[in-house]
Amino acid sequence: MSFNTFGRVFRFSTWGESHGPAIGAMVDGCPPGLPLSEADIQPFLDKRKPGTSKFTTQRREPDEVRILSGVFEGRTTGTPISLMIENKDQRSKDYSEVAKAYRPGHADYAYDAKYGFRDYRGGGRSSARETASRVAAGAVARLVIPDVDIFAYVSEIGGDAIDHARFDASEIDNNPFFCPDPEAAKRWEKLVDDARKDGSSLGAVVECIASGVPAGWGAPLYAKLDSELAAAMMSINAVKGVEIGDGFAAARLRGEENADPMRPNAEGGKDGNPVFLANHAGGIAGGISTGQPVKVRIAFKPTSSILIPVETVTREGAASEIITKGRHDPCVGIRGVPVVEAMMALVLADQKLLHRAQCGAD
Amino acid sequence: MSFNTFGRVFRFSTWGESHGPAIGAMVDGCPPGLPLSEADIQPFLDKRKPGTSKFTTQRREPDEVRILSGVFEGRTTGTPISLMIENKDQRSKDYSEVAKAYRPGHADYAYDAKYGFRDYRGGGRSSARETASRVAAGAVARLVIPDVDIFAYVSEIGGDAIDHARFDASEIDNNPFFCPDPEAAKRWEKLVDDARKDGSSLGAVVECIASGVPAGWGAPLYAKLDSELAAAMMSINAVKGVEIGDGFAAARLRGEENADPMRPNAEGGKDGNPVFLANHAGGIAGGISTGQPVKVRIAFKPTSSILIPVETVTREGAASEIITKGRHDPCVGIRGVPVVEAMMALVLADQKLLHRAQCGAD
Amino acid sequence: MSFNTFGRVFRFSTWGESHGPAIGAMVDGCPPGLPLSEADIQPFLDKRKPGTSKFTTQRREPDEVRILSGVFEGRTTGTPISLMIENKDQRSKDYSEVAKAYRPGHADYAYDAKYGFRDYRGGGRSSARETASRVAAGAVARLVIPDVDIFAYVSEIGGDAIDHARFDASEIDNNPFFCPDPEAAKRWEKLVDDARKDGSSLGAVVECIASGVPAGWGAPLYAKLDSELAAAMMSINAVKGVEIGDGFAAARLRGEENADPMRPNAEGGKDGNPVFLANHAGGIAGGISTGQPVKVRIAFKPTSSILIPVETVTREGAASEIITKGRHDPCVGIRGVPVVEAMMALVLADQKLLHRAQCGAD
Amino acid sequence: MSFNTFGRVFRFSTWGESHGPAIGAMVDGCPPGLPLSEADIQPFLDKRKPGTSKFTTQRREPDEVRILSGVFEGRTTGTPISLMIENKDQRSKDYSEVAKAYRPGHADYAYDAKYGFRDYRGGGRSSARETASRVAAGAVARLVIPDVDIFAYVSEIGGDAIDHARFDASEIDNNPFFCPDPEAAKRWEKLVDDARKDGSSLGAVVECIASGVPAGWGAPLYAKLDSELAAAMMSINAVKGVEIGDGFAAARLRGEENADPMRPNAEGGKDGNPVFLANHAGGIAGGISTGQPVKVRIAFKPTSSILIPVETVTREGAASEIITKGRHDPCVGIRGVPVVEAMMALVLADQKLLHRAQCGAD
């Protein structure tokens, strides 16, 4: 069922609201014996942390994680790993107006329609603050798949895309946008800052690549690797689209263009595996990994919290308009990068164990 | 866990291979007392049935469904509904070459890598024939959500898109492409036929709309309605991308453009609900339906079975090339339309019951 | 959720009613490459088959199983295994009276209360006929745990227990009661026959032992091996009690009596494991197998279908009395033996794969 | 999958070790709008709390619960409820010997066999301390089923049973044994105290009754109410047997004795339901509640932690013997009472929501 749980073998559940005392995650099904301490998790949280530049929300959260269970003498025990992050900088006064009227684009109206009432402080459970729990859980997941290398980056903001010819992975951490194209990063400074000053917001596209995934992960039919990735990414706040490999562009190719031809191992394959001459498929065929890099593209809508007034209704149904004061990300896709990476790690760790369960090997 | 099961409350499982004696689905968790007979299911199977035009595979399957359990005196009993469709026109001789070498773009290599061997006849379990089981299950799901109207159509083939200004829902069933734009349908005749004659194939984009979904369906956080739809659609053969509402286009909008403003019920709402002035969100906010139409866009890659030779390797790893003889769809996205509709129905039926479970109302 | 599915990795689902056209099971998550044909399943169904002696129901069912999917060239493919058994000897006329009034001890009233109506023919879904599907699935499960030896027997009928001092496993298949004590078997002939002639029925206790289970299977806390076994056994028709090891008798021991002392491997252990000097625990500690034989005891109530009139009410709520004509087992516990064995195999196969998933070894 | 999660719609997960910083539970799927504060949970924890008499462990734990999420303005929001209890009185020095050798009857050896190593401090995850998390979650479950009255009591200690003729529910809280028979309670004082002084321990039988459960809860076939209860109870530390209604005694009855005859509503039924003249079935038929009180009996083995030396082996496999110093319950079944009640509440809350999901009514 799992309202707030994701995964099949390596499972994680998250809890907590934006302005409650704490948020957290429980990781279950983690293999025993893996070295784990807070220091393995904190760097990923720091990468996602708010308040690090003017291009993200000014909420200041140290986001310090505590491991409350599941680790003994520095190693995982195979029992649930409880992770907790205290909320420190919640300022509920900022959200008084939100209690009365619905913010278009936000979950406000939908939560009210579903549950009859809602924790309106900072979006409550629907706040992107929840993604810190995912990032913490994702750091544990990475330990399960040490041979897999995962990285994500922003490839487009507000319709302004990077030039893949200038792609340089080493640039990703050199700018506040996780941008692999230094020229695009420069352009985005003004673009995002202008939007911020306008009280507006911008959408973004994030791309994520996992290399080192062996052929054979993914469980047909309804636990396909691409299906799981789509669910994982679409569950992130503000995500409206997911592509595997060429995605929608594949719909414009002919069969012979879209096929990823194979060549014998002797022509440069690793570990006895054949070589692929292209990767339109994004490393997945029939829902199972092929040994090529797994590639996912994710669309983030512009942040719905803006300072420009939008027409809305009050809880009582009266006409109104609303601006969302408070501290917000002008482009929520930027801080989506570590979240996307975490979800990739969580899906792959789970699929590795699921494959092992049925097929007896990693 | 559910390797071959989908859903949380209203669940379905499918079984069967392209060239085995039969395929089928088991629907579990269906509410009791719903009128159901084979006649409620058959029309949907007929819509998906192969061999109805030169634009689909020439395999001839009557696809007659039998209900083996779960119905008594014409009504569902609340116990599992077993649905079976016999395979009639399997011709295994067509696939002898596939046993030896991998078809690029197909699941052949991935299945071998995962399981050590595979049923190579017609793609075995990875064949799109499995989707007939989904369509049968989907017909049952529709009974659970009688107030929801679901329809899908092809909006683009081989990069040639419909003109939404000419959109006419009544045209969808008037052409072999499920195309709502009669002019596009005319162009596609030649387009698809040319690809077929070339031994090539084309990709397609399918759009699906569900209206009549009340606000409140969808269970945050990891059973969000959009997350479930993404998983459902991405599990369909050949699908490489999923968008909710504006999808990737939303990433190019500013916050104030993307917000769907709300107006009081007095201005034209139904059932006391507010009016939305736009639907960029595709009817879902925070993972929960808003009462607007739910909109999904799905990218189908071109069929991987083509008559144009592609470089590949044999099971023994030797260089080879392969053409896929047999009977194939030149554009698998066309027959994806009833499958997409079925998955939409299956997700919505499930979410309706899930919502009822927690919140006590439909 | 799984209304009609059991298991976590190795999962099976059953469908079908007593008087429908067929019953069946779908096994999902089975490892690939295991040799499997109908001949591997049929002997277990034959053991459970009705009509083999005057001590079981006279319904005549060949119970021939057909494998509809998941097997290719004689081996499991890793995809769902669909098993079907046609119903041949349903005689619905026997059950006309049951449509009108509730049989005490049966599920009739409860099903009506839950679902609003029910398939009353032979108990519909609540019939013990469903257990044939379990037995078929259990035969597949045995292939997953080839080193585990499972056997069950009846240890008590109508309060008349075997003498464990006379226990002889080779006797179990020499009498129609699966009784390991030939003297008890002799007594039971008259006991059961008398009950049958009286139109009454008797309860029974079944014991099941699985040897060869390695230490380490069972997943704390809520997938404990003993918890899974309890759920599995209690789900069988007519079962009202389950004990692991000494069960209720353990509640009468002191701590030092109940402890199973351990001795070094040198004193007779296998595979480097320590020796246990007793097995009060039934081979399970903390929900995990210890390497000792796993022992379960199961109480079956007397068959509720009897020819002695019992007070009841009609569907309309009027006072009535009812006798259950038709063909019934005078002691349903007897045919419970192969069902108990099947459930043991199903739980152990599942736990083996679950252990492998998390801990990476069998 | 759910290693550490229980339930289908109303689900709870627990985490934490005996000597870690804290333990906790996450409740998911709880309906929104229920009034909830720590004060609703604390009394149940106090009932289970150690150190309240000389008949329980002398570990002193305030067991104060904190609600970290899922409640806003005093009501549940429908999002996960995170409950945390800090460990205050862990004294790890007591357990040094346990690190080296296995305590027979404990999970020590099994955990090592499964995971390769273990948190030996106070039993780590296998400690009965985990049951405090269940009790906290159970208090929330009770809010979901306000019309159901649940109580449990000890009916037998060390083989000395209560006299049901003297049963007086109002006595249960008047003695440290949760004993409804004041004379038995008197006898048990000496019995348990003697065992304690001997450094030994005693087993116990607990009975639990839930009245007010309507007919129709329980989901056949593999989510049957009795099957769920068996799994729930057997998952509690030290439990070795579970009976529904007459349990094993039913195996000694004849069919006509075991039937629970029904009479028309006019003869004293409630809410239009028929009257049952007996309750051998324990309120469950075909896995579904009948409207009668649900009755479960549970066998607790004697505490395995005793001061009497038992033969064992060290982690290195050498012969040894062990006594378990530290603070232990001489009869762990006593404190099992609130745990059994909690598990009953958790199963019933879940089944209520599951029934509502499928059948649309409570």
Image (cartoon, coloured by chain):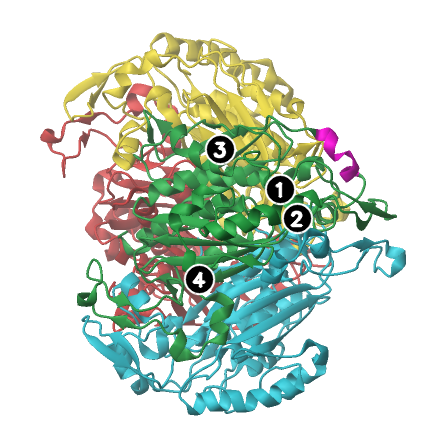
Chain colours: A cyan, B green, C yellow, D red
Q: CA distance from mark 2 to mark 3?
A: 40 Å
* Residue labelled with disc 3: C14
**Does dot 4 land on a helix, a strand or a loop?**
loop
**Does dot 2 land on a helix, a strand or a loop?**
loop
- What residue is rendered at 40% in x and 25% in y? C127
Position of residue C353 measured from the top left corner of the image (x, y, whole percent): 63, 46
Residue A153 sits above or below residue B330 on the image: below
Residue B95 is a magenta residue: yes
Kindly check if marks 2 and 1 are in contact, taking CB atoms under 8 A apart as contact: yes
Q: CA distance from mark 2 to mark 1?
A: 8 Å
Residue C356 sits above or below residue B58 on the image: below
Kindly check if marks 4 and 3 are in contact, taking CB atoms under 8 A apart as contact: no
In front of the other: B298 or A122: B298
Q: CA distance from mark 1 to mark 3?
A: 35 Å
* Residue labelled with disc 4: A4
Position of residue A63 measured from the top left corner of the image (x, y, whole percent): 50, 82
Q: Quadrant of residue A310?
A: bottom left
- What residue is rendered at 57% in x and 76% in y? A337
Numbered circles on residues, count: 4
**What's the residue type where badge 3 is placed?**
Thr
Of discs 4 and 1, which sits in the foreground? 1
Position of residue A284 measured from the top left corner of the image (x, y, whole percent): 67, 56
**Does dot 1 land on a helix, a strand or a loop?**
loop
Q: CA distance from mark 4 to mark 3?
A: 28 Å
**What's the residue type where badge 2 is placed?**
Ser
Query: Does residue C10 appear to the left or right of A215 in the view shown?
Result: left
In front of the other: B268 or B219: B268
**What's the residue type where badge 4 is placed?**
Asn
